[in-house]
């Protein structure tokens, strides 16, 4: 009863007072996107583009950028550990979607097709806008953009301004503490923006309200700890506390802007993100021979250093009107450590990848036409090392196989594109079309082939790939939009596809190198319709159908004439990545937003995806990475100093019959029937205490539901109180 009264107070008490204007209910009105590299009104872009604006990011109570995407209800996010977040777009995940930050590709040559946590290395507290491009976007962005692009745009330095922002956040579900500060110093032609964030997370508590069918699923009844120098399995006093899931993270950003004259600017963008060790929670719950298998399994500090320069001009003389030049360098270090129960030797595998990139983009606008042309390149240099460390003596020794070729690897992308917009009937009928050609080279060298008895000492590839897009936009009036589009996408096999060695499916299979891979390709058809009715109801529906060819899947393989190998003391079946499947994916996204009175908005959006592989044997099987039905429904109310929101996040069932038998859906971490459906009820409120001081409070998972997101290996947070304080000066 108390909860009901509190909810009613938040949503209804201010209704008799004066209201303030909300954001426009019609997202097509003035939204500007960079889906084509240069700014463009979303009405003139054929592909579906979703924008998370600054206001929504600022009001979000998410713990990282993965949580930010998930809380929109428009992006599905998988987690193998709390320090993670792997977005899924239209049934594609990890290396099959492209992550971009401030115009720089994050995807590199070791992005895998499984699940990735790299998105959390972007600081959501300094993020200004996120653009989500659904469907293939290879014409503009090149390789990897099969399912779409997620472009994170951080704040820019402001000229003629001195301002600072501070915030702190607490979450009771995992004892999170986050602190953030940023300072902008801007003169007439020069500006500097400095940002720092620190987050500390304790062990995450999962919901205690369980379904009868759950049994002991997901409970952390035992864990391994060291007692008197010896691994011991001990009882967990509270099985809902997911022991060894906490971590820390640090994020630093420095931007320098120089604008020597109007229409011309130079930007230097420096970003650094690092973390503590991040426990791989799902692996710490693996069972072998009736007991916990791993005493330790964690990712080492995930470090990302980026230095990027960008020159922008809108004062060109000659044929083109605008110029965008960029150059960037990234230094990324990733590592994984694992040690079996009562095994004194810790296995450490380290990856250091350095990435240099450039781009040059030009735009010409004249009459009914806009023409964009550009060239770009990315150059990857990878070094992999591996060693044992004795936990008692701390002595290191060699003899451990590296995850990637120990002789080093390189992979280089170069491409050129042309993108065109033509207003066939100005204000009514618009054509988008474009073409790209891409060239990719890859070289890997194996120095020590004795461990796996490799039949080769190197792997190399050269691929030329094409992509294209064409879309028609019909605008019958200012309140409606109808789109019909076709686009292709490609993903060149990278070092992770061709040359890695690792255990998969909880130790049930061993992945070995296969240098004979071809690029994956998609052919996509889109149909979209949006309409504003009477200035109070906005409705949008988008449907798509994708054909997936040369799909790279894990399948049974013979290595040196054998289909099993001795690995980590276990005779393990051998699999390898192979172009052995084709697939089709179809689905839709629907959204509705109702604003009956100023200040009050009711909204709902839902996403459904269906995908099936057809193997070389002609048999059909479910695709992996296909999320169940998911969405978000809520009500938002604003009045003067108060903004409130009540909403539900939900997922449908993922039955066992819809799991891929050889994929990355992590059935071992679900129930025997699959992953159950779930929903959570949530409340949040933002109080403007002063024009420069805001306080936020949220109650998440009000019913304390126990649930896991599909393909995830960690239970989602229990009922949580989230508090946030923001100040600006």
Image: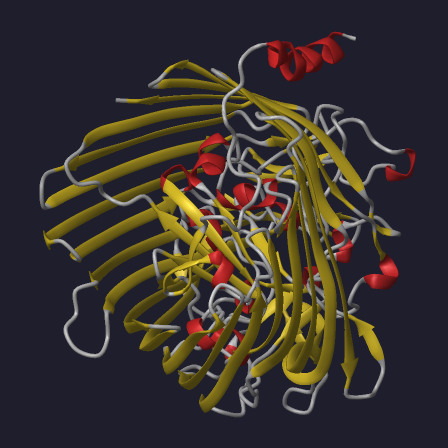
Q: Nearer the viewer, residue 293 or 470?
A: 470
Q: Does residue 729 appear to the left or right of 679 in the view shown? A: left
Residue 147: horizontal and vertical position, in percent? Answer: 59, 67
Residue 212: horizontal and vertical position, in percent? Answer: 91, 33
Q: Nearer the viewer, residue 564 or 699?
A: 699
Q: Does residue 19 appear to the left or right of 406 in the view shown? A: right
Q: Is residue 505 visible to the viewer in this orientation of the structure?
A: yes
Residue 193: horizontal and vertical position, in percent? Answer: 22, 40
Q: Does residue 326 appear to the left or right of 701 in the view shown? A: left
Q: Does residue 530 appear to the left or right of 389 in the view shown? A: right
Which residue is drawn at the image coordinates 53% and 35% (left, top)?
62
Residue 375: horizontal and vertical position, in percent? Answer: 31, 79
According to the image, what is the colour scheme of the structure? secondary structure
Compared to residue 381, the image places residue 644 above or below, namely above
Q: Is residue 142 visible to the viewer in this orientation of the structure?
A: no
Which residue is drawn at the image coordinates 71% and 45% (left, top)?
631
Which residue is drawn at the image coordinates 24% and 57% (left, top)?
307
Residue 361 found in image quarter: bottom left
| Placement of the C terminus among the 4 image quadrants | top left
| Placement of the N terminus among the 4 image quadrants | top right
Q: Pick out the residue farthest to the right.
A: 212
Compared to residue 482, the image places residue 10 above or below, namely above
Q: How many marks?
A: 0
Q: Nearer the viewer, residue 220 or 194?
A: 194
């Amino acid at each position: 009863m108390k909860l009901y009264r509190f909810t009613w107070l938040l949503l209804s008490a201010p209704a008799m007072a004066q209201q303030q204007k909300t954001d426009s209910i019609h997202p097509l009105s003035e939204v500007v996107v960079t889906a084509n590299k240069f700014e463009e009104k979303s009405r003139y872009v054929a592909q579906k583009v979703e924008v998370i604006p600054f206001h929504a990011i600022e009001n979000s109570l998410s713990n990282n950028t993965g949580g930010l995407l998930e809380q929109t209800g428009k992006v599905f996010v998988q987690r193998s550990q709390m320090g993670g977040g792997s977005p899924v777009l239209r049934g594609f995940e990890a290396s099959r979607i492209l992550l971009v930050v401030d115009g720089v590709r994050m995807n590199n040559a070791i992005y895998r097709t499984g699940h990735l946590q790299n998105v959390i290395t972007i600081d959501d507290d300094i993020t200004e806008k996120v653009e989500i491009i659904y469907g293939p976007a290879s014409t503009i962005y090149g390789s990897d953009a099969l399912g779409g692009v997620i472009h994170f745009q951080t704040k820019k330095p402001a000229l003629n301004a001195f301002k600072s922002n501070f915030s702190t956040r607490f979450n009771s579900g995992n004892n999170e503490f986050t602190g953030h500060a940023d300072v902008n110093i801007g003169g007439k032609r020069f500006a500097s923006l400095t940002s720092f964030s620190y987050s500390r997370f304790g062990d995450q508590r999962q919901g205690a309200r369980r379904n009868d069918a759950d049994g002991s699923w997901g409970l952390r009844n035992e864990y391994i700890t060291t007692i008197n120098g010896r691994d011991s399995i001990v009882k967990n006093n509270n099985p809902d506390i997911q022991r060894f899931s906490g971590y820390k993270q640090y994020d630093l950003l420095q931007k320098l802007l120089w604008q020597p004259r109007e229409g011309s600017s130079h930007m230097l963008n420096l970003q650094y993100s690092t973390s503590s060790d991040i426990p791989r929670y799902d692996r710490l719950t693996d069972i072998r021979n009736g007991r916990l298998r791993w005493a330790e399994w964690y990712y080492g500090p995930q470090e990302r250093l980026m230095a990027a320069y960008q020159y922008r001009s809108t004062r060109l003389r000659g044929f083109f009107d605008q110029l965008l030049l960029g150059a960037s360098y990234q230094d990324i270090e990733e590592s994984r450590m694992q040690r079996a129960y009562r095994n004194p030797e810790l296995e450490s595998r380290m990856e250091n990848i350095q990435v240099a990139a450039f781009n040059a983009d030009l735009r010409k606008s004249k009459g009914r036409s806009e023409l964009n042309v550009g060239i770009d390149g990315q150059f990857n240099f990878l070094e992999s090392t591996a060693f044992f460390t004795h936990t008692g003596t701390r002595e290191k020794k060699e003899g451990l196989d590296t995850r990637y070729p120990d002789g080093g690897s390189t992979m280089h992308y170069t491409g050129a594109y042309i993108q065109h917009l033509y207003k066939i009937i100005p204000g009514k009928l618009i054509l988008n079309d474009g073409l790209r050609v891409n060239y990719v080279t890859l070289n890997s060298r194996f120095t020590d082939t004795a461990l796996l008895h490799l039949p080769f000492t190197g792997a190399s590839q050269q691929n030329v790939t094409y992509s294209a897009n064409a879309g028609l936009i019909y605008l019958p009036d200012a309140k409606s939009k109808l789109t019909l589009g076709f686009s292709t996408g490609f993903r060149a096999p990278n070092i992770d596809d061709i040359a890695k060695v690792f255990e998969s499916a909880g130790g049930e299979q061993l992945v070995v190198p296969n240098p004979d891979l071809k690029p994956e390709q998609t052919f996509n058809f889109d149909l979209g319709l949006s309409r504003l009715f009477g200035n109070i109801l906005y409705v949008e529906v988008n449907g798509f159908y994708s054909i997936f060819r040369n799909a790279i899947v894990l399948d049974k393989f013979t290595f040196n004439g054998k289909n099993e190998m001795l690995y980590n003391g276990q005779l393990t079946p051998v699999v390898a990545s192979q172009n052995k499947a084709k697939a089709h994916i179809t689905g839709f996204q629907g959204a509705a937003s109702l604003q009956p009175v100023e200040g009050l908005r009711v909204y709902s959006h839902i996403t459904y995806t269906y995908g099936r592989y057809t193997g070389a044997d002609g048999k059909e099987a479910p695709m992996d990475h296909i999320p169940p039905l998911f969405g978000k429904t809520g009500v938002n109310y604003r009045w003067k100093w108060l903004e409130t929101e009540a909403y539900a996040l939900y997922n449908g069932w993922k039955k066992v019959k819809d799991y891929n038998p050889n994929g990355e859906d992590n059935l071992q971490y679900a129930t025997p029937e699959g992953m159950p459906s779930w929903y959570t009820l949530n409340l949040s409120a933002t109080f403007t205490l002063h024009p420069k001081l805001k306080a936020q409070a949220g109650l998440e998972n009000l019913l304390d539901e126990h649930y896991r997101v599909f393909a995830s290996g960690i239970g989602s947070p229990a009922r949580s109180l989230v508090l946030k304080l923001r100040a600006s000066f």
